[in-house]
Image (cartoon, rainbow, N blue to C red):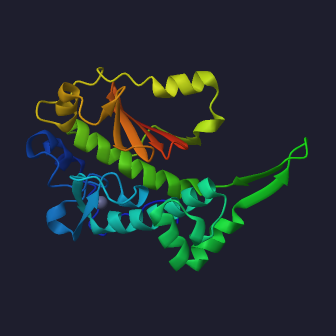
């Protein structure tokens, strides 16, 4: 399954979205726009706890989303945590995992473990070096990362990033050229003009949790940056290994 399933109560009436500025976004699932009044709902953490280490940061933002979206994300987030754990440790063995969620998922889900094992390719370089690559299921990786990016836009800027992003990219940091690396990390913080009272506004003024424009959720584990300029751009760095970029245009 690569794409999130639409919830039963999926609401395609775009006229209801016009009300966003007034009712804020609490009445709608920020992922599919379903009216939360007519759906079963769940509370969802941003970022996903499966991508973090324990103890979790206090006051992790929570957003209420529809159960259909939540279910879709849960499966893809489990895969993503397990895959990331396998790549970082070079193994699907639960005993050697450094990401708690990866250990948990790989231990209790043998079919997912086998599936990730099959995505591993060992080869020898021309120089005779043994190398391993892992082929991610990008649809699932994307679903997990876009979900978090949308949550960051919502919490930091107080706005919904609706629909499909116009750009999505996730790649290991070590594959960046020096120029790509510089471009990725030179996220201008003050281009953002957050609304009064939003979390980003508070952060801009106090510098809380911020380092060079990046919001550090857990050091070495999860950091992200948000910018707004003809749309929303979110960059996420996971475990200082994976760099992701998600962009929505207005
Ligand atoms: Zn939804």
Is 46 in front, or is 239?
239
Question: What residue do we see at 33% from left, 65% from top?
Answer: 70
Work out whether residue 124 can be spotted.
yes
From the viewer's perspective, is residue 63 above or below residue 210? below
Is 245 in front, or is 104?
104
Tell me residue 116's x, y (percent): 63, 66
Tell me residue 159's x, y (percent): 22, 39
Residue 173 is drawn in which quadrant? top right
Residue 157 is drawn in which quadrant? top left
From the viewer's perspective, is residue 121 above or below residue 213? below
Question: Is 102 situated left or right of 114 in this image?
Answer: left
Q: Where in the image, quadrant-wise, is ligand 1 located?
A: bottom left
Question: Is 58 situated left or right of 244 in this image?
Answer: left
Tell me residue 13's x, y (percent): 23, 53
Tell me residue 190's x, y (percent): 29, 20
Residue 53 is drawn in which quadrant? bottom left
Most distant residue in the left direction: 22
């Amino acid at each position: 399954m690569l794409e999130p399933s639409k919830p039963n109560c999926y609401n395609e009436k775009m006229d209801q979205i016009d009300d966003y500025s007034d009712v804020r976004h609490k009445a709608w699932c920020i992922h599919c726009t379903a009216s939360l009044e007519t759906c079963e709902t769940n509370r969802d953490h941003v970022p996903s706890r499966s991508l973090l280490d324990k103890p979790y940061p206090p006051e992790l933002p929570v957003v209420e989303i529809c159960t259909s979206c939540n279910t879709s994300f849960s499966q893809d987030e489990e895969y993503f945590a397990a895959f990331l754990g396998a790549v970082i440790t070079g193994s699907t063995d639960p005993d050697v995992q450094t990401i708690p969620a990866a250990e948990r998922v790989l231990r209790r889900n043998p079919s997912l473990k086998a599936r990730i094992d099959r995505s591993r390719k060992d080869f020898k370089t021309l120089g005779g070096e043994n190398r391993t690559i892992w082929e991610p299921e990008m649809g699932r990786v994307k679903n997990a990362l876009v979900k978090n990016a949308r949550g960051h836009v919502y919490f930091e800027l107080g706005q919904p990033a609706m629909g499909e992003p116009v750009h999505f990219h996730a790649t290991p940091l070590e594959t960046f050229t020096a120029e790509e690396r510089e471009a990725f990390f030179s996220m201008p913080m003050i281009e953002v003009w957050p609304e009064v009272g939003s979390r980003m506004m508070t952060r801009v003024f106090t510098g809380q949790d911020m380092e060079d424009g990046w919001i550090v959720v857990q050091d070495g584990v999860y950091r992200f940056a948000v910018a707004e300029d003809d749309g929303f751009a979110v960059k996420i760095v996971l475990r200082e290994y994976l760099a992701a970029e998600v962009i929505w245009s207005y």
